[in-house]
Image: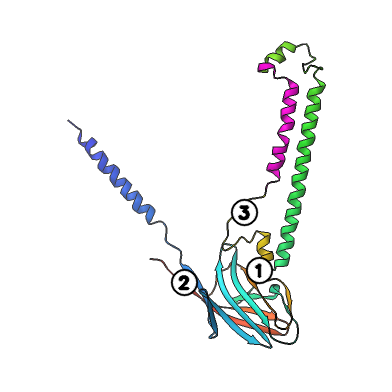
Amino acid sequence: MKNKSTRSFPLLLMGACLCSTLFLTSCFTPKPVVRVEPVDEDVRWQYGQAFARQQADGLEVQAAYNGNNREYLFFDVEVTNFGEEEVLVDPKQFYLEVKGMKMRAADPEVILLGLDMDASRQEANSKNAAVAIGVAAVAATAAIIATSDGDGNSNSSNNNAVSNSFDGGYNNLDLAVDLVSIVPSLIIDLSSPRMVQELPPVDPQDRNFWTDFTLRKTTLRKGERVSGKVLFRTLDLDDRFQMILPMESTTFRMQFKQLLFQPH
């Protein structure tokens, strides 16, 4: 006859599992989904993006929010010069005005310089490490060969003991050859590229992103246009904020509003 406590054990286990499940599901709440739209009346939509558009002094500027990650806020900006004079477009002059603070845009030229300097340092470190391993391997090989005779056997009085420590006639010279043979694989491991975290929509740690996708410093002649992504360091946006885009003697001010959608 089964014990009453034994029969109640499955019920207690089931209750504990149910309580644990309810506790775990109640620990996390979904983050609000962020959307940013322009406040200006002159808005042009393109593939779901709302572009604020302004014109002044022969220039036309359009800007739209493109998302964010843990590092940056992404905006798509386009500038067209319809005037007679050349105009310099420099993203390092752009900034956001949020809660009374100015947040400067990332300068692609400075970022590229930093990435190239990091790559140069890593290459030098990898070569130095490879040389150090090679020197150590050659030194070890020379030392082992120096203690061996022409047949690859040790010159010490304990020849039999040494031979018995390597099964199948595996001697010191064979060990030295194997040591040298592993050096190339070590060099390859040391020079392998560093892992970078995946970032939407593209990776800002990738040099190609800054050269091919961002808005670069450009002089526009009449009829010319330049576009690209402008990045700002991630920060807590206000319900309303401004993007300020100075260009030559003209300054564009674009109003944006933040919309928060809370998943239920």
Dot 1 corresponds to which residue?
A: 214
Q: Is residue 99 visible?
A: no
Residue 108: give x, y in percent of width and height.
70, 67
Task: Answer left or right for 56 relative to 23.
Answer: right
As rendered, which of 24 and 174 lies closer to the eye? 174
Foreground of the two, 162 or 29: 162
**Would residue 259 be visible to someone looking at this image?**
yes
Of callouts 2 and 3, which one flags the residue occurring earlier in the amino acid sequence? 3
Of labels 2 and 1, earlier in sequence is 1
- In space, the residues marked 2 and 3 are separated at their CA atoms by 30 Å
By secondary structure, the bulk of the magenta-drawn segment is best described as helix
Image: 39 above or below 132: below
In the picture, residue 151 is in which quadrant? top right
Q: Looking at the image, which residue is at 72% across and 11% down?
A: 160
> Which residue is labeled 2 in the image?
260
Q: Where's residue 1, x and y in %?
A: 17, 30
- Name which residue type carries label 2: Leu
Q: Are marks 3 and 1 in contact (CB under 8 Å)?
A: no
Which part of the image, by quadrant, shows the C terminus? Answer: bottom left
Q: CA distance from mark 3 to mark 1?
A: 19 Å
Does 189 appear in magenta? yes
Location of residue 119 by image quarter: bottom right
- Please name the residue shown 75% across and 49% down the image: 123
Q: How is the image coloured?
A: rainbow
Residue found at x 74% / y 21%: 172
Q: Which mark is residue 88?
A: none
Say which residue label 3 marks.
196
Q: Is residue 188 above or below residue 177?
A: below
Residue range (magenta): 167-192
- Secondary element at tag 3: loop
Q: Nearer the viewer, residue 261 or 81?
A: 81
Name the amino acid, label 1. Answer: Thr
